[in-house]
Image: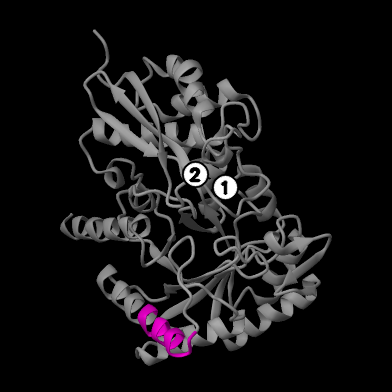
Amino acid sequence: MKNKSHIKKVNCRRVFDSRGNPTIEVEIITENDSFGKAISPSGASTGTNEVIEVRDNDNMFGGKDVKKALEIINKKIAPNLIGLSCEDQNGFDNTLISLDKSVLKENIGGNVTTALSIANYLCASNFNAEHTFIYHSESNKFFIPKPEIQIFGGGAHANKNNTFQDFLIYPIVDLSCEDYFDSVYNITNTIKKKLVNNQNFFGYCDEGGLYPNNLDQFQICDIINESIIENKIIPGKEIGISIDVAASNFHSNGIYTLYDKELDSKELTNIFDILINKFNVSLIEDPYDENDISSFIALKNQYGLLTSIIGDDLICTNYSLLENAIQKKAIDGLIVKINQCGTISETLKTIKLAKENNIKTILSARSGDTEENFLSHLAVAWETDMIKVGSFARSERTSKWNELVRIEEKINKI
């Protein structure tokens, strides 16, 4: 008799992400017709150690089509997944890894493995008729991670690569979703009114954040601080400001070109000094190029008591790179993105290492994301410290915030 948890079918198709680019959707179906479905997201600002996407590079969709990826799933991967139990995530992911055999999954594609791995993970909770955040929780210590929400977008998300990428806010004190989202709504709309009144509102970026136009990092943080205060909230005490610098995007040969001004790492550090001491910035992500780890170390040593230094491109959700950063005491936290390493199992291994070393974990969406809301469940199940999915606008972003509201309701009833 066949085990009802065994996979009997794998479906895949081309769908589209939030930027309108083609991507992969996968369905895993078991013998009893339980299923899991996932769409692979895609980043614009990517680290060199992220897994490689398989794209067609032909005349369809500007070369970004995924026909090759779908063929790989149908012909090479699916036959090896039939008969596996959806409950054996490690076995599922090890099958994917063994079929690729490259460090960055360039043979079968990181976008392929990401969609498959997540779909199987969700299938297991559906097979057990349980909410994903409950079924995959290891301790049943349910809490809502602090939402880090984008206010301004820049960098690769706004076709302005010589600027900082994200300006965000997050709750320092414990707040319910209702209270925090109310604050975010009010702060965001206060800022928008200021921009409109100054004839400086020019639209939205990839993740729904306000477009920065010609405002520099100090002007942006000044507006955010003013708007927090105008809403009778104390910046730096109740609401924190965080910045994703994404410095690799404006770095070349040891020089950082910020707003067309060339800076070395020490001059860039002077900018961070002002942002930390004058503008209440208490979390800085990827402040330097991913290969400039010595500058990460120096910044952490100098400002570790005032701000958290977070690695994204520096780590790429890679266990070995995190080990190195921990050994060198380069970071206080890391961004976690499943499609940087390509499987759930590898992601969880990296998260475990972070937690064992008191490294803050921030589960993150991508700039080219999807309408799905599984990240909210995973952030709760994995007990990450924060969750970062973009702005408080656009359905692919609010789908995650809305699901956090639903999860919080369920947690309060447990």
- Is residue 195 one of those drawn in magenta? yes
Q: State the extent of the magenta-drawn residues as a range.
A: 188-199
Can you say whether 360 is above or below 242 in the image?
above
Instruction: Between residue 39 and residue 403, name the one nearer to us.
Output: 39
From the top left corner, tell me how far across and down residue 59 is, in percent.
57, 35
Can you say whether 75 is above or below 229 in the image?
above
From the top left corner, tell me how far across and down residue 330 is, in percent.
68, 61
Instruction: Between residue 136 and residue 317, name the one nearer to us.
Output: 317
- Is residue 395 one of those drawn in magenta? no
From the top left corner, tell me how far across and down residue 122 is, in percent.
33, 37
Name the residue carrying label 1: 317
Disc marking residue 338: 2
Question: Of the residues shown, which amino acid type is indicated by label 1?
Answer: Thr
Q: Is residue 144 visible?
A: yes
Q: Earlier in the sequence, mark 2 or mark 1?
A: 1
Disc marking residue 273: none
Marks 2,1: beta carbons within 8 A: yes
Q: Is residue 276 visible?
A: no
Farthest left residue in view: 413
Q: In which quadrant of the rendered image does the N terminus lie? A: top left
From the top left corner, tell me how far across and down residue 284 is, in percent.
59, 70
Can you say whether 393 is above or below 322 in the image?
below
Q: In which quadrant of the rendered image does the C terminus lie? A: bottom left
Query: Left of 271 or right of it: where is 4?
Result: left
Farthest front residue in view: 59
Q: Residue at x 65, y 85 (%)?
A: 274
Q: Secondary structure at mark 2?
A: helix
